[in-house]
Amino acid sequence: MDRRLVLVLLFAIVAFSGAPSMARMQIGVAQNRSGIDIQVTELMIHAMRARDMGDMNSAELFWIQARAYRPTLPRPAWLDQPPPRQVDYLPPPQDELLTRIANMPYSEAKLLLENKLESDPANAEVRRLYLELAEANSDSAEMTRHRSVLSSDSNYLVKIVKYLLLTFLILAFAWQAYRLYCDLRNI
């Protein structure tokens, strides 16, 4: 009887001491399994995005990679369907767009015009519309800003002519002063 008790206790010790390590191994398998599930899901999402963009080769490669992680993964039906057609959106012409913006409230128009000027700061039509709207709404900061940019082109030539004329006058006075000095020296 003592021998039976020893065997039962020995069996219980071995069985219960191995249970936590077995449980840890099963938890590790579950964690690895969830990591694989995440990778498979991400690869399938990449495959769907590639198909939606019309890149069927990449979509097929992503599905093959996902299948490498999970060989029982069935081929999705959307992989065999043609990609959806992309509708090209053509923005309206600039004249029409500026007409629409001119009819908007100033606060909304100001945001749209700022975005247009950020992408193309040299666009004079957008600046003129912005200046007109700023004058209509008494926005002095924007009026000053756009007037200075729009009027700088016309003043540029005038400034150059003024500087050339000033240079010519200085040279003429210097020449006359030199001639006067030479004449006074000869007397």
Image (tube, rainbow, N blue to C red):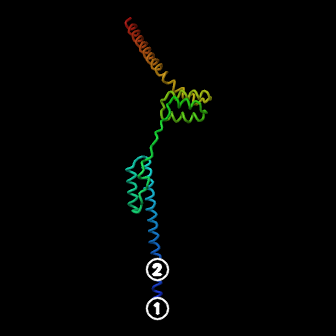
Question: Looking at the image, is mark 1 or mark 2 earlier in the sequence?
Answer: 1
Q: Please tell me in which quadrant of the rendered image residue 168 appears.
A: top left
- Disc 1 or disc 2, which is closer to the eye? 1
Tell me the SS state at disc 2: helix
The residue tagged with tag 1: helix, strand or loop? helix
Identity, as a three-letter code, of the amino acid under mark 1: Arg
What's the residue at 49%, 21% (across, down)? 154
Determine crowd level at label 1: few under 14, some 14-19, many 20+ residues with C-alpha closer than 10 A: few
Task: Specify whether 176 is left or right of 152.
Answer: left
- Quarter where residue 160 is shown: top left
| Residue found 41% across the figure and 9% down from its top | 180
Which quadrant of the view contains residue 36?
Answer: bottom left
Residue 17 marker: 2
Indicate the position of residue 115 as horizontal and vertical percent values.
52, 36
Question: Residue 86 vs residue 131: left or right?
Answer: left
Q: In this view, does 136 lie to the left or right of 56?
A: right
Indicate whether 186 appears above or below 92: above
* Residue 6 x %, y %: 46, 90
Q: In front here: 52 or 9?
A: 52
Q: Name the amino acid, label 2.
A: Ser
Q: In front here: 123 or 176?
A: 123
Q: Where is residue 26 in the image (x, y as percent from the top left)?
A: 45, 71
Residue 187 disc label: none
Towards the viewer: 70 or 108: 70
Residue count near mark 2 (Cα–Cα under 10 Å), binned few <14, some 14–19, many ≥20: few
Dot 1 corresponds to which residue? 4
Image height check: is 77 above or below 137? below
Q: Where is residue 52 in the image (x, y as percent from the top left)?
A: 44, 48
